[in-house]
Amino acid sequence: MNWILGIDLGGTDIKCGAFSPAGQLLARRLVSTRDGETMEGGHPAFVEEVRRALPSLAKELGGMPPRRAGVAAPGLAARDGTHIAFMPGRLRGLEKLNWQQALDHPEPVPVLNDAHAALLGEVWQGAARGRRDVVLLTLGTGVGGAIVSDGRLLKGHLGRAGHLGHLTVDHHGPPTVAGTPGGIEVAIGNATVGTRTGGKFAMTRDLAAAALAGDALARAVWDESVHALAAHLAGVICALDPEIIVIGGGIAELDDFLFAPLRAHLDTMEWRPNGHRVELQRAALGNWAGAYGAAFNTLSPLH
């Protein structure tokens, strides 16, 4: 069987998906990343975990190895797409790792930033299927993002394009992890809930539950966060003119608690020539979007 391996490397686990060239998920494996561990020979343990998953995937698909393979991973991908060039602080051994050599694969193994890959997955088989002007935001611990413009994935000079969580919404605000002041990830990311609530809540899900139960502080903090997100999106719309914005990540799972007020704020903020509004959708592929995108990148990289 002709199948494609899509690998999405996360800090805790690795998604290994087997896809048909048409985009059907045929089989999948979830294995541990084992960040920080190194195997004999110098390879990081996460490479060994992927190598161990391959035989069982191949057996399930008739015994044939994958025709193509692609990787999604955190960090900035090299311009030639062979490896992650910049990922400090975690996933030791990822920087400069050539995945074609690591997997002993006969064909080149293209490597993408994980948010870039997630957007390609949503364009291939998800909420933005077939669209040519798309923005993705992932709302989780921080805020990630990616951009497809006129059918092309925007990577930029160093691969920084799409890191929308670092765009400033409060120029006096505390810096993001990238150093930009008052980025949207500070305003709505899960990592800052404790700071935004004076220590009363630690996680967005707890903040949301309290707001729904009538807690006045929780409601005020949440309303302020969603208002900031709407202002951020209004600016992104003016800069990139997407036809659809896809929102994923754990915070997007709050559904109408997020999307209803967000749409209401955009009704007053968004520039809508001739009444045209940008479509806003929740991501459809969940945690497997990056694996979809890594596989799709072997077929049609949208460069």
Image (tube, helix red, strand yellow):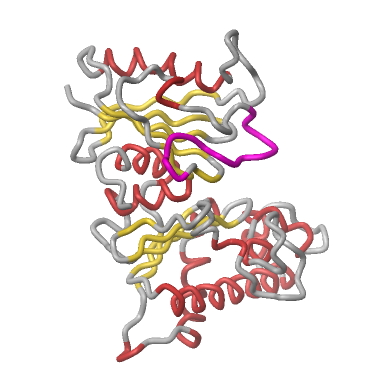
The residue most toward the bottom is 274
**Nearer to us in this view, 218 or 302:** 302
Foreground: 120 or 60?
120
Q: Position of residue 174 (x, y in %)?
A: 77, 65
Q: Position of residue 191 (x, y in %)?
A: 70, 53
In this rendering, position of residue 213 left or right of residue 127: right
Quarter of the image for residue 81 reads top left
Along the line of sight, which residue is nearer the eye, 187 or 293? 293
Residue depicted at 66% across the width and 35% down the height: 90
> Farthest residue toward the right?
198
Magenta-span inclusion, residue 147 = no
State the quadrant of the N terminus: top left
Identify which residue is drawn at 51% across, 81% down: 265
In this rendering, would 267 be left or right of 92? left
Q: Position of residue 280 (x, y in %)?
A: 39, 69
Q: Is residue 86 magenta?
A: yes
User: Magenta-highlighted stretch: main secondary structure?
Assistant: loop
The answer to whether 288 is drawn above or below residue 141 in the figure is above
Is residue 148 rendered to the left or right of residue 115? left
Residue 71 in percent (x, y) is at 42, 34
Q: Which residue is at 50% across, 73% downward?
A: 233
| Range of residues picked out in magenta | 79-92
Q: Residue at x 54, y 55 (%)?
A: 160
**Callout count:** 0
